[in-house]
Image (spheres, rainbow, N blue to C red):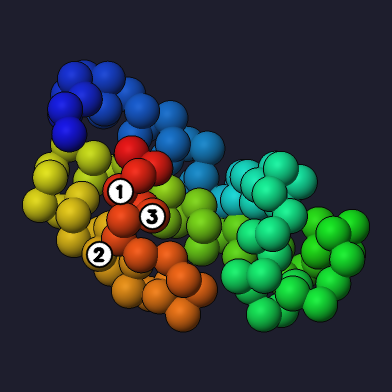
Amino acid sequence: MTPMNPIRHANLMLELDSLTCTVELKQNMGKNILRNLLLNFPNLMKMYKTIQSMTLPQALNSQYLCQLGVKYTDSIVELARNFNDNEKLTETIIYLANAHRHRGITVAHLMVSY
């Protein structure tokens, strides 16, 4: 993986940190990302037990999506933070894959996204 220009990476992290400096901002960002993912790929609902049995509109408006949004945003920020350090990035990807193994997500799924 080609590292990002250090100045560009630092600017990205400053922007991400300002966009996610409160729980409410993290929640909104994560919820919006998850809503877009679920709208475009409704089968992803099967990965989350809490919303598996809901209709798509119910899932999109569920409190669970707000809770999940914070975790999702934290993971994205952590991946971005470690992007220029291959060792840390690999550790983060492996950690996330192991944490989500029960959902059928593997290291390969996370690596393909990069």
Q: CA distance from mark 1 to mark 3?
A: 6 Å
Residue at the limit of the structure toward the left, as seen here: 87
* Placement of 112 over or under 9, stated as above or below: below
Q: Please state which amino acid type lies under the numbered disc 2.
A: Ile
In the displayed structure, 12 sits above or below 53; it is above
Give the quarter of the image for residue 55.
bottom right
Q: CA distance from mark 1 to mark 2?
A: 10 Å
**Residue 111 location, x and y as percent?**
30, 48
- Quarter location, residue 81: top left
> Which numbered mark, 1 or 2, is in the foreground of this view?
1
Q: Which residue is the site of mark 3?
A: 109
Secondary structure found at label 2: helix
Mark 1: give few (<14), some (14-19) or many (20+) Cα within 10 Å.
few
Q: Name the residue that disc number 2 marks.
A: 94
Give left or right: position of 84 versus 69. Answer: left
Q: Residue 16's spot in the image, x, y percent?
A: 44, 36
Q: Residues within 10 Å of mark 2 (few under 14, many from 20)?
A: some
Between 5 and 55, the one lying in front of the other is 55
Which residue is painted at 81% across and 77% down in the image? 53
Question: Between residues 9 and 38, which one lies in front from this camera angle?
Answer: 38
Which is more N-terminal, label 2 or label 1? 2
Question: In the figure, residue 15 lies in which quadrant?
Answer: top left
Q: Quadrant of the C terminus?
A: top left
Residue hosting label 1: 111
| Mark pair 2, 3: CA separation | 11 Å
Under circle 1, the secondary element is helix
Indicate the quadrant containing the N terminus: top left, top right, bottom left or bottom right.
Answer: top left
Contact check, label 2 and label 3, Cβ < 8 Å? no
Q: Amino acid at mark 3?
A: His
Vertical comparison of 28 with 45: above or below: above
Q: Secondary structure at mark 3?
A: helix
Q: Residue at x 56, y 60 (%)?
A: 70
